[in-house]
Image (cartoon, rainbow, N blue to C red):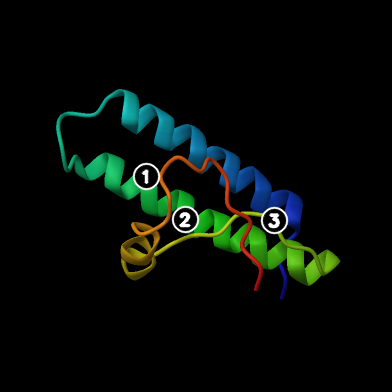
Amino acid sequence: MSIDPRVALSSLTTALEEHLIAASNRRGDGDPSVEAAFFAVADAFEVYEDALYEAYNEVTPLQVFDDEDNEEEADVDEDEDLEIVDE
């Protein structure tokens, strides 16, 4: 059973709004509410991306990186605002 991309998008938007609230109420480094909101955004994005692909054979220009990917990205020029990733 596939998820309607509009429903997945709504969930992603909600997750982003909750992340903003958590970030604005941060109580120091490693705040568990910010971390939970961060992962909720990543999860909601992946559901949206999958739903979009299933329904329309389309993807977004965005990508979720895990910790291993972040280590590799540290070598990328930090002055570059946007990098297009070809798969």
Q: Which residue is mark 3?
A: 60
User: Picture coordinates of residue 24 (x, y %)?
Assistant: 33, 23
Q: CA distance from mark 1 to mark 3?
A: 21 Å
In the rendered structure, the answer to whether residue 14 lies left or right of residue 21 reads right
Q: Mark 1 or mark 3: name the one nearer the start of the chain.
A: 1
Q: Are marks 1 and 3 in contact (CB under 8 Å)?
A: no
Task: Check the image and report above or below for 6 versus 2.
Answer: above
| Residue 68, image x, y percentages | 33, 70
Q: Is residue 56 toward the left or the right of residue 34 in the image?
A: right
Q: Earlier in the sequence, mark 2 or mark 3?
A: 2
Which residue has dot 1 on it?
37
Q: Quadrant of residue 48?
A: bottom right
Q: Amino acid at mark 3?
A: Thr
Q: Around disc 1, counting alpha carbons within 10 Å, would you say few (fewer than 14), some (14 to 19), or many (20 or more)?
A: many
Q: Residue at x 74, y 56 (%)?
A: 5
Callout 1: SS = helix
Disc 2 on helix, strand or loop? helix
Foreground pick, 31 / 87? 87
Residue name at image x 56 percent, y 62 percent:
46
Q: Which mark is residue 53?
A: none
Three-letter residue code for mark 2: Ala
